[in-house]
Image (cartoon, helix red, strand yellow):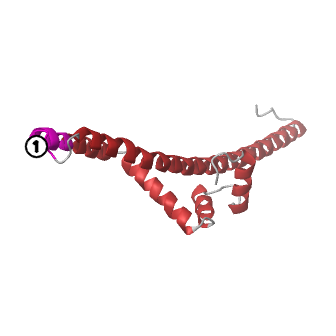
Amino acid sequence: MHPRETATSIEHLVERHAVGPLVHPQHIIAAVRSEETTVRRFNGWLADHIVAAAGTMAFFHFLWLLIGGWAAWQSGLLHNRGFDPFPYAFLFFVLGGIMQSLFVPTMLTASNRAAERDRIKDEADHRAWSHLYDVNDTQLELLRTLLARVEALERALGTSPTR
């Protein structure tokens, strides 16, 4: 699904997979995902897991140890006589270029999938709350009808009103 789909298309998507007013968003998301190709499902799954791992403090500590280890290895242990005459240029290339070129599209893919899940959940929540409001309105109308009948019965019997 494209991230800029209209609210109407999301509503039709939920309508197509929903059974009643109470919708379980995970069932709809699973149904939508089952309509995708295997490669697209795998790519989305991989993007979600990479972004989930890269967004943790463990990954931050891994990068910190990698950079610190590289600096200690090239500058401290080898006294700038390592295999690379410009030790920080290679580190900058690996961390700056390669990781950014891999992480940016991965994060955007995961972000689009999260937005899709959020739109489906929002539509399901809207349907559920609308249904609950309709039920509440029906119950209030029944209570008003009962109150009117009780008051009419009290007037007919000549007793005092209940209010």
Q: Residue 47: horizontal and vertical position, in percent?
A: 47, 54
Residue 30 visible in the picture: yes
Q: Nearer the viewer, residue 156 or 84?
A: 84
Q: Nearer the viewer, residue 68 or 132?
A: 68
Q: Residue 37: horizontal and vertical position, in percent?
A: 59, 67
User: Label 1: few (<14), some or many (≥20) within 10 Å?
Assistant: few
Q: Nearer the viewer, residue 125 or 101?
A: 101
Is 71 inside the magenta-drawn segment?
A: yes
Residue pictured at 74% horizontal, 55% vertical: 12
Highlighted range, magenta: 69-82
129 relative to 57 in the view: left or right:
right
Quadrant placement of the N terminus:
bottom right
Is 25 inside the magenta-drawn segment?
A: no
123 relative to 144 in the view: left or right:
left
Q: Tag 1's secondary structure?
A: loop
Q: In the picture, residue 85 is in which quadrant?
A: top left
Q: Nearer the viewer, residue 151 or 120?
A: 120
Residue pictured at 69% horizontal, 48% vertical: 5
Provide the major secondary structure of the magenta segment. Answer: helix
Task: State the residue lying farthest toward the front.
Answer: 85
Q: In the picture, residue 157 is in which quadrant?
A: top right
> What's under tag 1, amino acid-wise?
Leu
Residue beneath disc 1: 78
Task: State the residue lying farthest toward the right.
Answer: 156
18 relative to 158 in the view: left or right:
left
Q: Residue 15: horizontal and vertical position, in percent?
A: 73, 57
